[in-house]
């Protein structure tokens, strides 16, 4: 059977009916959020203390920067586009993977990491790099999609350290997504252990970038986070609300990007915030994670990105300005749909297509047959799915 | 003799073939150039380039919307990215056992065969063989700019023939075209007009 569009149509109509009402409610909440941002713009220190007084390790929100390390910026500040550095080495990495498929002809997984290096201020074409690792046999024991994704993320960053070590400074490295290693500790003992191992290695990689003096950042396109909005909720919360913070969500539905899109002009960045999350305890001292919002769009067409960077970058004015300027320059290369050019190229370099996956499978099948090993073949379920004729998701 | 490799075969049929090449290989071949595809046993297929096609892709479409594209990005796209660049070739003859025939090749070249640009000596040798028999492949071709292709080819062939002691070749070739197109006035006018722009074969 295919989709019953009659059924879907009725639900789509329901969606449409409630949309305008929800939109009006969201606008009202957004206005509230703006007022709170304005009201608490200069209250960075008080807010930081208020957030830290909440005894909830799972709390995820923005935190005004630590006044003992750097003078906090006004929360509603907008910082103009700095001058582009005359010379710098830009590095970007991205990864792609073939997940283990128990129904496939042979069992394996693969991580493919692509990186690209470009010298700012030089005409020579960028250089691309590829690292590919196949996992098979006992390497697949307890391997889940999440563990493989962690392995991919780790390899992306490790490749950047490797390339940065040989690059001419100043070096700026970019990855897609947050700098905070994304994992699901606790889903299973294997995943918890893999996450811990990856995290330890990852922190070592970050230390490596720090030792090299590299300006490193993660680029989050169209961010869905409400970290600053959550901070504003806490700002406006009464002591009774703080006691029940998990359910206290007066600004639910408002995202940070909605809040900043009217504040930031094209090319401008927001204030720097520290990231308060359950993982913060792992990122200490110069690794403490910070972020800011950046309007990479054009006049009348704002487009917000969230940039994550560790303390040694975010709290260093010179490094921060270089990162800011380079990101805007990179995004402008892609014209009407701004996104860092090098990140796109790293993605393009790393991407594994379905055809390539089939080729790798065939290579393994042929090699095993050459060694006289019989292949069990794909599962009957997969065989039935692969039959020609009807195609469906 | 330096061989100029211009790319590898993507697809083919008896009447023609399409060659894929990198952007940095594009400097040598030009519209109207004679190319050859060596096969086994002294068998070689000849063709004339009648189209050079550069496809776009999503990224290129996006890049053109930017205010300016800097040299590094242009170099990256031309040298590093797999930008499709195709050269279409019209089959005009073949060589077998050292003899050139202005007939369609008995079998087309195969995928990934290497395509070379013909040297002036090879071009001179090909056009001197027989009595312009390969013109009929050009005149029969549909959806290609026949007049422009003939003009470009005659210009290159005349230069080769002059270098190899046959300066009157273009006049003879033009006469032959007039004879072949005597019943097709519109095409004859198109061809003569294009030849006039090249000032070869006494047409000006």
Image (cartoon, rainbow, N blue to C red):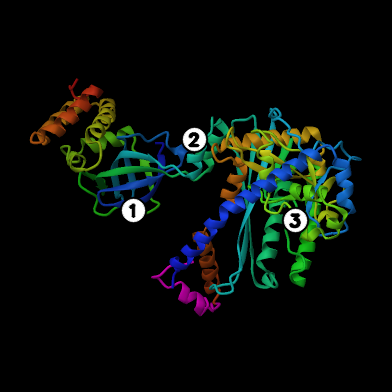
Kindly indicate the quadrant of the structure image that contains residue A118: top right
**How far across and how far down the image is residue A183, in percent?**
73, 61
Judging from the image, mark 3 belongs to the subunit labelled: A
Residue denoted by label 3: A249
Name the side, left or right, on which B176 lies relative to A71.
left
Residue A378 is inside the magenta segment: yes
Residue at figure coordinates x 19%, y 20% from the top left: B204
The answer for how far apart the CA atoms under marks 2 and 3 are is: 44 Å
**How far across and how far down the image is residue A126, in percent?**
60, 39
Residue at figure coordinates x 54%, y 35% from the top left: B75
Kindly indicate the quadrant of the structure image that contains residue B188: top left
Does the rendering let one see residue A174? no
Are callouts 3 and 1 both on one chain? no
The part of the chain drawn in magenta is: A373-393
**How far across and how far down the image is residue A114, in percent?**
62, 50
Are the residues at dot 2 and dot 3 in contact (C-beta closer than 8 Å)? no
The answer for how far apart the CA atoms under marks 3 and 1 are is: 77 Å
Name the side, left or right, on which A82 lies relative to B28.
right
Residue denoted by label 1: B40
Instruction: Say which label, 2 or 1, has the lower sequence index.
Output: 1
Q: Describe the element under mark 2 as helix, strand or loop.
A: loop
């Amino acid at each position: 059977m295919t989709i019953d569009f009659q059924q879907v149509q009725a639900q789509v109509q329901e969606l449409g009916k409630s949309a305008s009402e929800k939109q009006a409610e969201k606008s009202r909440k957004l206005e509230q959020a703006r007022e709170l941002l304005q009201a608490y713009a200069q209250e960075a220190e008080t807010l930081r203390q208020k957030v830290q007084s909440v005894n909830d390790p799972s709390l995820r929100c923005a935190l005004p920067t630590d006044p003992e390390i750097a003078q906090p910026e006004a929360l509603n500040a907008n910082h103009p586009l700095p001058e582009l550095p005359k010379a710098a080495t830009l590095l970007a990495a991205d990864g792609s993977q073939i997940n283990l498929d128990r129904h496939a002809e042979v069992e394996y997984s693969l991580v493919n990491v692509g990186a690209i290096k470009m010298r700012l201020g030089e005409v020579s074409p960028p250089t691309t790099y590829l690292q590919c690792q196949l996992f098979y046999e006992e390497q697949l024991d307890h391997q889940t999609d999440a563990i493989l994704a962690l392995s991919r993320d780790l390899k992306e960053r490790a490749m950047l350290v490797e390339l940065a070590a040989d690059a001419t400074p100043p070096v700026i490295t970019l990855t897609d997504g947050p700098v905070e290693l994304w994992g699901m500790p606790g889903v299973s003992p294997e995943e918890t252990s893999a996450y811990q191992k990856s995290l330890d290695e990852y922190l070592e990689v970050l230390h490596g970038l720090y030792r090299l003096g590299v300006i490193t950042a993660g680029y989050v396109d169209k961010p869905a986070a409400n970290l600053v909005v959550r901070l504003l909720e806490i700002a406006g919360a009464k002591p009774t609300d703080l006691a029940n913070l998990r359910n206290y969500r007066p600004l639910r539905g408002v995202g940070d990007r909605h809040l900043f899109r009217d504040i930031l002009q094209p090319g401008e960045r927001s204030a720097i915030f520290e990231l308060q999350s359950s993982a913060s305890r792992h990122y200490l001292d110069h690794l403490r994670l910070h972020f800011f919002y950046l309007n990479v769009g054009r006049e009348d067409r704002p487009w917000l990105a969230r940039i994550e960077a560790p303390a040694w970058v975010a709290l260093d004015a010179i490094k921060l300005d270089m990162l800011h300027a380079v990101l805007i320059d990179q995004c402008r290369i892609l014209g009407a749909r701004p996104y860092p050019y090098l990140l796109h190229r790293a993605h393009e370099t790393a991407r594994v297509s379905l055809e390539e996956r089939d080729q790798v499978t065939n290579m393994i099948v042929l090699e095993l047959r050459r060694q006289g090993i019989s292949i069990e073949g794909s599962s009957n379920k997969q065989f039935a799915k692969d039959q020609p004729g009807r195609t469906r998701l | 003799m330096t061989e100029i490799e211009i790319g590898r075969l993507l697809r083919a049929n008896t009447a023609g073939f399409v060659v894929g090449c990198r952007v940095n290989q594009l400097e040598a071949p030009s519209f109207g150039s004679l190319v050859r595809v060596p096969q086994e046993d002294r068998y070689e297929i000849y063709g004339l380039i009648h189209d050079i096609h550069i496809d776009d892709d999503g990224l290129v479409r996006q890049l053109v919307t930017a205010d300016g594209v800097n040299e590094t990005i242009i170099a990256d796209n031309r040298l590093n990215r797999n930008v499709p660049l195709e050269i279409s070739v019209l089959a005009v003859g073949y060589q077998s056992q050292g003899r050139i025939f202005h007939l369609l090749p008995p079998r087309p070249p195969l995928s990934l065969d290497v395509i070379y640009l013909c040297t002036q000596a090879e071009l001179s040798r090909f056009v001197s063989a027989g009595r312009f028999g390969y013109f009929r492949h050009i005149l029969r071709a549909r959806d290609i700019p026949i007049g422009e292709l003939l003009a470009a080819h005659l210009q290159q062939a005349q230069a080769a023939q002059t270098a190899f002691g046959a300066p009157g070749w273009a006049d003879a070739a033009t006469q032959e075209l007039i004879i072949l197109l005597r019943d097709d006035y519109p095409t004859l006018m198109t061809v003569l007009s294009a030849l006039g722009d090249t000032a070869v074969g006494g047409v000006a």
